[in-house]
Image (cartoon, rainbow, N blue to C red):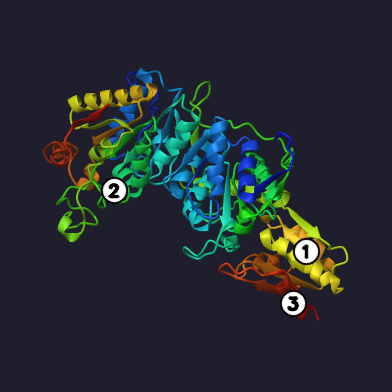
Amino acid sequence: MKAKTSKKVLMSGNEAMAEAAIKANCFFYAGYPITPQNEIPSYMAKRMHDEGRVFIQAESEIAAINMVFGASACGVRVLTSSSSPGVSLKQEGISYMAGAELPAVIINVMRGGPGLGNIASAQSDYFQSTRGGGHGDYFTPCFAPYSPEEAARLVMLGFDLADFYRTPVLVLADAIIGQMMEAVEFPKESGFTKKLPPKTWALTGKSGRTANIVKSFFLKEGGLEVHNEHLRKKWQKIKENEQRSDTHKTNDAKYLIIAYGSEARIALEAIDILRAKKVKVGLFRPISLWPYPEKNLKTISKKIRKVFVVEQSLGQMVEDVHLSIPEKEIHFLGKTGGGIPKAHEIAKFIEKHAK
Amino acid sequence: MPNKTRPASLKNISTHYCSGCGHGILHRLVAEVIDEMKLSEKTIGVAPVGCAVVAYDYWDFDVCEAAHGRALAVATGIKRCRPQNVVFTYQGDGDLVSIGLAETFHTANRGENLTCIFINNACYGMTGGQMAPTTLVGQPTATTPWGRNPKSGEGWPVKLSEILATLSGVAFAVRSTISSPREVIKTREYIKKAFSNQIENKGFSIIEVLSPCPTIWQKSPINAMKWIDEEMVKTFPLGVIKDK
């Protein structure tokens, strides 16, 4: 898809993601208030009205995801956003959408959990986001931005990818990315180059064709197995084609930090601290959390002696690192419940283990 | 066998419904009205979770699935994106009044311009006859083996249509049954009126239909119809509740 060129604008990550959805021709938004993502529905309420599109403040996150289900079934581009407890409520709907092969972008601006947790930044929904999240055999492509500008780009990418593969796509931001303000320049294109298929399956009334049915229910014996095998091929294709990652100062690195989202931003400062002390450390930053960028990680880590995984959680992404490069020495630094591993703490941790 | 009187919007195949079940009649009434109003190319139905979950196998127009209780949220999404289409949900009492009550109430309160066909059989049919919000006082079910008893904390039958009628967004609320040819014809007229309301942008319409479930009620099809006329209507009186 193509969007208009724009100059740099000072925006929060939440506003940038909302504007990106507008630029990506999102026609329908439904959401429910929850901190720290409230700037998204507020922004969408105004902009969707200006653009003559649909904004609904739903009665719950459950209603919002099901409204999005219905709108997506009509073939328009749809968005919902929430934060951790609200995204838990949406999981049933996301599972239905994965089963019914309905495209959507779902933004989760993560906060602390479990339970009501708190409203501070956290990365503790990694498992939920990368392992399906709801009931049944499915995955959702999941992208984690580390700046407001990248958040905007990933939302645009998410819409294209959702339409191409007919799947819900998660954009997994954290409270820091959602709330921080930075200069944002919206990209002209999402970076997705494959041609999007026409939505011949959409419900528009059966004028000039046979009736369409949107469903995830396959009661007849063997029916669901056939459907899920079809889905398996799709997940495999996504795994093969949609791994995304970034690196920083890895050319000469002997030590590798692996972090995503706001924690990757913090890791950049830790690298400066360590490099000043002649510690050769670099960053591997997964952008797609599912599919996990294991191919690039395998390549990058060939000359790496030790790996340091840093997360705002008790240790979730670290499991994918173990699965990707099991032969490596892997150390984990994580803080939880609003705790954020800071640059000097990361540097100290690496110095201790790098000896 | 081809049947000349079968509405085109109803496929010529056998349904999975039990003998004496109301869904057969109601599927047909919906199809007849759609044909009569020439809406088959404009209609988008939303099927529930419950016995009518595969209604899309029987109707010949576009139909969307919905998670249990969420049909009206799904229908809201559809109608807001496709205001030129006629959108309706077809839901049972557990779906509409129990698990989906929030969606039901708020869709009605927003005055969404769509139609809700509410099949009230006073029980959960598909899962084996558990207590529904509409189960009558004293009615035995799988989960109220001695009969629904409000004094045991099992609550009273919920009169949803009367509750929704109090909301400004509701244009039309009516309760009917299909216990006799006369009532079937009335129900057909109500469905037609609700679709007309939608075409005229009047807002939310609900048609509650008291419908037999002989299997769960453990009655013959004829006695199930009698039970509607003699017992159900005492709790759920028939007639137009609101016509704005």
Q: Quadrant of residue A283?
A: bottom right
Outermost residue on the left side: it is B230
Up/down of A80 relative to A351, above or below: above
Same chain under badges 1 and 2? The reply is no
- Label 3 vs label 1: CA separation? 16 Å
Q: Which residue is mark 1?
A: A283
* Precedes in sequence: disc 3 or disc 1: 1
Query: What is the number of the mark on residue B36?
Result: none
Q: Amino acid at mark 3?
A: Lys
Callout 2 secondary element = loop
- Label 2 vs label 3: CA separation? 61 Å
Judging from the image, mark 3 belongs to the subunit labelled A
Number of callouts in the render? 3
Q: Which residue is mark 3?
A: A348
Residue A352 location (% of width, % of height): 76, 80
Q: Where does the C terminus of chain A fall, quadrant-wise?
A: bottom right
Same chain under badges 3 and 1? The reply is yes
Up/down of A274 relative to A227, above or below: below
Q: In the rendered image, is residue B11 in sight?
A: yes
Residue A331 location (% of width, % of height): 71, 74
Foreground of the two, A244 or A219: A244
Mark 3 neighbour density, 10 Å: few (under 14) some (14–19) many (20 or more) = some
Foreground of the two, B168 or A286: B168
Query: What is the number of the mark on residue B124?
Result: 2
